[in-house]
Amino acid sequence: MRQGQIAIALPKGRLFSESIKLFEATGIHGLEGLTESRRLLCEDSTGAYRFLVLRPADIPTYVEYGATDLGVVGKDILLEQERDVYEPLDLKFGACRLVVARPKNLQDREGSVGFSSFRVATKYPNLAERYFTEQGVQVEIIRLSGSIELAPLAGLCERIVDLVDTGRTLQENGLEEVEGIASATARLIVNRAALKTKYRQVRELIDRLTAVVQGERA
Ligand code: PRP
């Protein structure tokens, strides 16, 4: 990495294009390489910034270890992982909810038979475990990596804990929301050491991002 260069982790997937737009709105140029190709790494036109495209769940790890100075990641992942990172800014986009859902046709069976304990499939084992413990409900958590909505249809579990944005994925897979657990938006996270060693550059970027978020979305 170039001396003084700031490394920023961007999430693949549903937060990607808004993340790119956000940094472009601060006046950073040259990110087309990431949107128009399969490149996972690029520098901006001045060389002051380097952008890495990562799986969302890996971003807190990169930032905590200082492999990138900053990152954009959903609050859902921060709540799940509880990493030691500084979280200075709610970026306000990517709003979604973490919910418990079940197959629609399970209602009738539950009504007559009842479950003494549930199997729950999720990408959020810690949040799910905590939630059901607080409810006093005994569950077996099954950790999966994606396509969570398929798990009850395949007979793997009776419940899922997953993100809902438009609700389409639940709807189109015959599932219904039972309870909400948390709300989430995209957040800016910062490596704690970088905040000291690269204070001026990091602070300036946080201020520019804050101005964009407040100006565009207030
Ligand atoms: C997320 C989430 C749901 C879906 C919700 O999945 O896990 O499956 O989006 O969106 P909706 O309410 O608008 O339908 P993602 O696309 O991140 O894929 P994955 O969980 O299978 O990795």
Image (tube, rainbow, N blue to C red):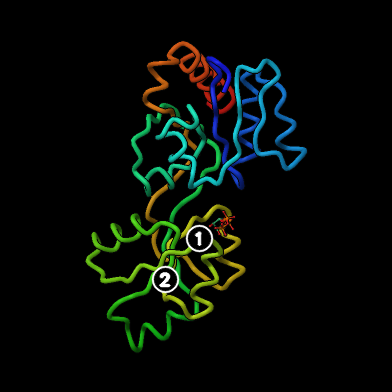
The furthest residue to the top? 200
Q: Mark 1 CB in 8 Å range of ligand 1?
A: yes
Position of residue 179 in the picture relative to residue 150 (left or right): left
Vertical comparison of 214 with 148: above or below: above
On the rendering, which quadrant does ligand 1 occupy? Answer: bottom right
Residue at label 1?
A: 145
Residue 19 appears at what percent x and percent y?
60, 34
Task: Identify which residue is drawn at 43% across, 58% down.
Answer: 99
Residue at label 2?
A: 159
Q: Nearer the viewer, residue 83 or 212?
A: 83
Q: Report which quarter residue 119 is drawn in.
A: bottom left
Provide the secondary structure element on which disc 1 rests.
Answer: loop
How many other residues sit within 10 Å of disc 1, few (<14), some (14-19) or many (≥20)? few
Task: Identify which residue is drawn at 45% across, 44% down.
Answer: 184
Q: Report which quarter residue 118 is drawn in.
A: bottom left
Amino acid type, callout 2? Arg
Amino acid type, callout 1? Ser
